[in-house]
């Protein structure tokens, strides 16, 4: 297939994006309290704040929408979704939810309890928020290389450190560990994949102590692609054979289908345990909706049923992961320090190495988010001192996270490589004048510390 290296689709419908001047963007940024979440999308040229719910759907998905069955109970759309879930997850029971965090909520209610530990590679914020409200204690046990934004490239930086996991179990007692959550891919340190070997070993270790394993599987096909292309023994397996093997090692999976479901809304709670499923049904009925829709419309379930199959297409995945790698290469050519290797859904710029003069207490990655928006209208998100900062329970002193980065999340099937060039050029230009930037301070924030980045207000120093 020589020459067939371009996007494996052609564009049938377009959405215009507005342009703006630097002076306008400076004004808008100030009005937004220097928090990119508070900008209006019409003020943004290229939106890389998230890869969630922003995918372009295919013509097959748009036509599936028309087949949506909106019956309250037992709609055909649910059964079509269930069939796709069986193919991809290989697990029998599925409870739809309106998005991933609702599945997180149900999972937390079933598996977690106050004062018990939840081990993970790196827990995503919405699980952390749920855990914080319940009083459950999330701990991140990614490997040392995975926690270090400057470490050398390694194929599976999303892996869980088995030794750290074993030590906590020995120290606290297995009865005080309520669950192990493997997030695939690991969003918080670069969209880094978890190897099949690690999934298998984590599952074996947890199983020895009777601790259940859950997979947070928003980016399941991207993880499977990395296993296929980087892990010996998987080259000749299909993506669905790999996803089914991944899920064979867990009891339950949650999914935000806004990522690898290739849809704009939706979530899944999937399990092999009938009792767990029945508990999930009860929680869904109270919080989401009846068992066969769980907060989704029939048409959205139909689009998801198609999207789950499409995302496993190898030509799509090659293009998808290739586009992220393309941006990573362009940034490296300009000297911009990034987490290497690039992962599944975006490029993560190392805030500390980019702005060495700005200490973590002054939010270097948030400063970079503002600088990039101001320079080129590109909107990204901070994953660093603001999003992951915590406070010591006794002294109230701030605790700074190991990961200090700005994530450039790439929407699926939305932007072309010309957009990637704009991002790389703008960041390259900022990098050349990096000495001119100073830090920021937070002037207000919300009450749930793990979610403060969504609403915090900042000032420039
Ligand atoms: N789990 C992971 C690994 C996620 O990345 C997300 C969302 C969720 C759960 C929650 O799902 O948004 O459907 O409720 N991540 C988005 C992001 C928001 O920007 O990374 P949701």
Image: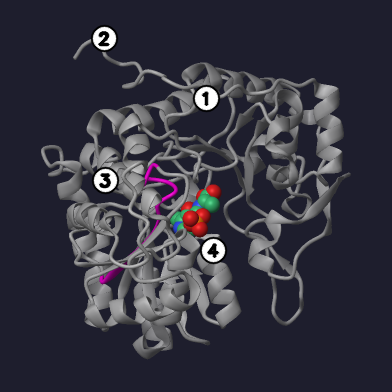
Please name which of the two marks, 1 or 3, marks the residue nearer to the observer: 3
Which of the two residues, 241 or 351, is positioned nearer the viewer here? 241
Q: Write the residue at 42% across / 61% down.
A: 121
Q: Position of residue 101 (x, y in %)?
A: 49, 63
Query: How many neighbours does mark 1 have within 10 angstroms: few (below 14), some (14-19), or many (20 or more)?
Result: some
Q: Position of residue 72 (x, y in %)?
A: 37, 65
Q: Secondary structure at mark 2?
A: loop
Q: Magenta span has 256?
A: yes
Q: Which residue is mark 2?
A: 3
With respect to residue 120, does 241 lie above or below?
Answer: above
Q: Mark 4 = which residue?
A: 126
Residue at which label 1 appears:
332
Q: Which residue is mark 3?
A: 224
Q: Which residues are magenta?
A: 251-262
Quarter occupied by residue 367: top right
Residue at image location 24% in from the left, 53% down from the top: 80
**Disc 4 on helix, strand or loop?**
helix
242 lies above or below 21: below
Question: Label 3 vs label 4: CA separation?
Answer: 23 Å
Q: Residue at image x 47%, y 58%?
A: 99
The reply, left or right, for residue 226 in relation to residue 400 is left
Cα–Cα gap, marks 1 and 3: 26 Å
Q: What secondary structure is marked by label 3?
A: helix
Seen at 62% across and 18% down, the residue is 425
Q: Earlier in the sequence, mark 1 or mark 3?
A: 3
The total number of labels drawn is: 4
């Amino acid at each position: 297939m020589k020459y067939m290296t371009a996007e494996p689709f052609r564009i049938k419908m377009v959405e215009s994006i507005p342009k703006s001047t630097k002076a306008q963007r400076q004004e808008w940024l100030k009005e937004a309290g220097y928090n990119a979440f508070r900008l209006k999308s019409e003020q943004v040229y290229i939106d890389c704040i998230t890869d969630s719910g922003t995918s372009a759907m295919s013509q097959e998905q748009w036509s599936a929408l028309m087949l949506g069955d909106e019956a309250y109970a037992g709609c055909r759309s649910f059964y079509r979704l269930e069939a796709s879930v069986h193919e991809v997850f290989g697990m029998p029971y599925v409870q739809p939810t309106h998005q991933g965090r609702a599945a997180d909520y149900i999972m937390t209610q079933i598996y977690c309890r106050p004062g018990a530990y939840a081990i993970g590679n790196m827990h995503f914020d919405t699980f952390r928020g749920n855990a914080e409200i319940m009083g459950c204690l999330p701990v991140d046990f990614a490997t040392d290389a995975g926690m270090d934004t400057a470490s050398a490239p390694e194929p599976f930086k999303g892996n869980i450190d088995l030794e750290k996991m074993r030590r906590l179990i020995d120290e606290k007692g297995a009865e005080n560990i309520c669950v192990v959550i493997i997030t695939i891919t690991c969003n918080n340190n670069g969209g880094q994949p978890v190897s099949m070997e690690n999934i298998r070993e984590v599952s074996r270790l947890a199983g020895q102590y009777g601790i259940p394993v859950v997979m947070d599987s928003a980016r399941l096909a991207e993880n499977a692609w990395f296993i296929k292309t980087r892990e010996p023994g998987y080259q000749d397996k299909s993506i669905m054979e790999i996803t089914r093997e991944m899920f064979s090692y867990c009891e339950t999976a949650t999914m935000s289908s806004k990522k690898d479901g290739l849809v704009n809304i939706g979530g899944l709670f999937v399990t092999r345990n009938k009792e767990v499923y029945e508990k999930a049904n009860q929680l869904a009925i109270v919080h989401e909706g009846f068992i066969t829709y769980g907060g989704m419309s029939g048409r959205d379930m139909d689009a998801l049923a198609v999207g789950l199959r499409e995302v496993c297409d190898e030509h799509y995945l090659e293009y998808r992961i290739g586009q992220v790698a393309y941006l990573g290469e362009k940034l490296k050519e300009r000297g911009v320090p990034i987490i290497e290797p690039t992962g599944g859904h975006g490029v993560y710029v190392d805030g500390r190495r980019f702005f060495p003069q700005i200490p973590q207490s002054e939010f270097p990655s948030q400063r970079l988010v503002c600088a990039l928006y101001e320079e080129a209208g590109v909107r990204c998100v901070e994953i660093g001192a603001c999003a992951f900062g915590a406070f010591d329970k006794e002294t109230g002193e701030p605790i700074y996270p190991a990961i200090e980065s700005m994530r450039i999340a790439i929407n699926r099937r939305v932007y072309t490589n010309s957009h990637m060039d704009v991002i790389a050029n703008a960041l390259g230009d900022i990098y050349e004048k990096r000495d001119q930037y100073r830090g920021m301070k937070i002037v207000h924030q919300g009450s749930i510390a793990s979610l403060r980045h969504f609403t915090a207000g900042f000032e420039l120093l």
